[in-house]
Amino acid sequence: MSLRLPLCAVFGLALWVSACQLDKDQKPARGVVHYSLSSATTALGDDGEPVISASAQAGIAGSLEMLFGTPQAPSYQLLPEWKDEGFNPNWPQFAKGDNGSGEVDPAALRADNQIYWRRQLAAIDAGLWERVFVQDFAPDLVTQWKQLCAETPVEARNDEFKKAAREAFENHYPDLAASSELYRQQCLHCHGPEGGGNGPTAPFLNPRPRDYRHGTFKFTAVGKAQPRRADLYRILDEGVTGTSMPSFRRFSQAQLHGLVDYVRLLSMRGMVERSLVATYTEEETLTAGDTIDAYAEVWEKWQKADSKVLNFDGAVPAPTAESIAHGRTLFMDAKTGNCFSCHGPEGRGDGTSAFVLNPETHKVVPAYKDDWGNEILPRNLRLGVFRGGRRPIDIYRRIKYGIAGGPMPEAASSLSSDDIWHLVHYVGSLSERTQHKAAAAHADHAAGAHSDGASGEKH
Amino acid sequence: MRYFFTLMLLLVPILGVWTFVEADRWQLWFPQNVSSFGGEIDGLFNLILYMVGFTFIVTELALAWFVFKFSANRPGKAVFTHGSHKLEMIWTAIPAVALLFIAFSQMETWAKVKFESNFPKGGKYTKERPIAELWASQFDWRVCYPGDDGAIGTADDLERSYEFVVPVNTDIVFHLRSRDVIHSFFVPEFRLKQDALPGHTIPVWFRAEKEGIYDLVCAELCGWGHYKMSGRMTVVSQAEFDKRMADIKAEWFSNGKEQGQ
């Protein structure tokens, strides 16, 4: 009984001391981490030995680290010829644009930063320093803010300080290391540390998260080439409807552009790795020259992305009844559109060519796999859910240029762009909720045309 | 020892009340209210808070008093009692009356906010012609505005993710829908929360009275990415709203060249 009070006091004191320790803003020191090689590189052959010898694997890993750095300190190796061009992809590109693709508009980023950091800016203006709270989503800004505060004591914070503080927030553009940290917080759990689409939550998702290492991205405006920054940015900005990829617009535009920079680094790293593995498999040896060649080649592909953009010149035509009817004819025609063979006569994604009968299990299974080895189904066009976007131009691009990495082909060359627009209008009309009944009646009426088309395909 | 424990127990109501008094200063209290019916919701909250707070203080004081009075070193023997019909009647009747009072006093506000028959009529947006359809899905919000035809579910619908833009000082009616599981629309500044059920189209109304950017969050644990499911409710002037709609429309029907997308 007499012991209880002192025990309580000692216990309370211990709790208080440990709480104070936690409060000291000490994060546990992290060890240096490295990117891993892909499972294709480290795969074992039939004899149980690695296909690529352990020493060659170490060589590839070393080369990649030299070219791209580590997750905590990602940085590109600079090629000699970039010096003359003044191109340095490691430099935070705020207010500078990017030689690879120049869509980053500094004024827009600044304006967006002012909205994103509005609470912080208001607190700075009001002189409420303790309310300037920077989430660790922006690690570089946290460092910058702490440094600013450490340099100027509270009494000495005048308008000059306020101006400097404002500018730090308004001009915020993360470097690769900061973007890598944001990537690890927000993206890694699905897309994996190397962007291999193999994060811890990936097995629970359908469709599976994108594996960047092929350098192939589905929903772009460049056909099947490497995407532009604007294409990747749009995915982060809008999300991919019908998948687990949400919109990340709650982050500032600068942070999203930073993430695009980092995704591009991961993608290039994967492409160089695949290229080195291909070279080694062919030649049984790897030289330093091979590595630099592969690196330069991959960079060229990404830098050329902007020149590959496939635009439609002119205004997007409005749908008319004739256009929709014509679109349907093309949709059902085996020689021109031939859409029905996969997407089904009613656009329900149940066309006969998209499925095969598995002779062993006697089950109907999807006929196609995408480049990443996942089974893939044709889109059900009735749901109004289009992963690459529901805008007319998005559907136009999907139809005309196909979808990279999947079985959706480019449109036949016999189709003019007017024909593609007819198809776009027809596909758009399929997902109109108010017209479902009418469209279903129409489809019944055209059932005869379907069987004709199918037999036509077999010939 | 009896003084020590009595003081400890007295600290509970004192610190408890102090927390509420100081909450506003530490920004632990409500976010600002910007909706027309938010004041009534806050009023109901405060009503219950005062009722519960009064009970809390009385019972805590009684507890401290009993601990002080009937401590172990009090001389004499304890008396065993069992049951008091009168007392039981009282402590059943008082809460029953209190609960009925709460139940009746909230009815009007609830009906005003949630009953479809009480939705604002005669305005630009009605149950039949909502401003937009808000789709919740794992794990984001997508807004589907009607195109020129004013009807949703047609080919000219305009779709944007994340940001829901509405004009200020206007009765807004929108349709809440879910693509997969149960989500919940919650804008703390509007004092408005409504579950989104798959397969249901749920009309929701509000009237925002102050321009600004407010957080739109999912208030129903909807899966592993629930914490990611945030959106932005942007309340702007009518002129700015028209401009935003024009921008969204221009972007939607662009050929992808001007915006580089």
Image: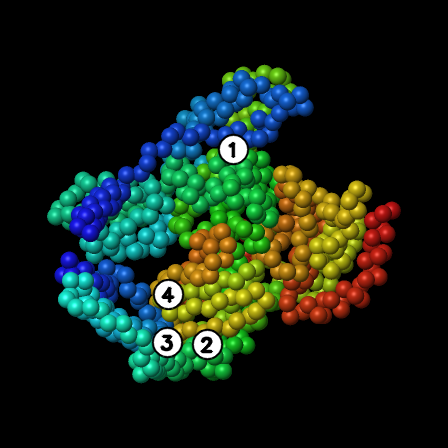
Marks 4 and 2, how far apart in space?
Answer: 16 Å
Question: Which badge, 4 or 3, comes first in the chain's sequence?
Answer: 3
Residue highlighted by disc 1: A268
Is residue A257 in view?
A: no
What residue did someone put label 3 on?
A: B37
Front in this rendered view, residue B162 or A428? B162
Q: Which of marks 2 and 3 is nearer the N terminus?
A: 3
Using the image, determine if residue A305 lies above or below residue B114: above
Q: Going 63% across and 49% down the picture, which residue do you hit?
A: A398
Q: How far apart are marks 1 and 2 (CA)?
A: 53 Å
| Amino acid type of the residue that numbered disc 1 sits on in the rendered structure | Met
Tell me which residue sits at (55%, 60%) in the image.
B181
Asked whether residue B55 is in view, the answer is yes
Disc 1 to disc 3, C-alpha distance: 54 Å
Return the chain for callout 4: B
Identify the image's colour scheme: rainbow, by chain, secondary structure or one colour.
rainbow
Q: Please state the chain letter of the residue tagged with numbered disc 3 in the rendered image.
A: B
Residue on which disc 2 sits: B114
Residue type at the position of mark 3:
Phe
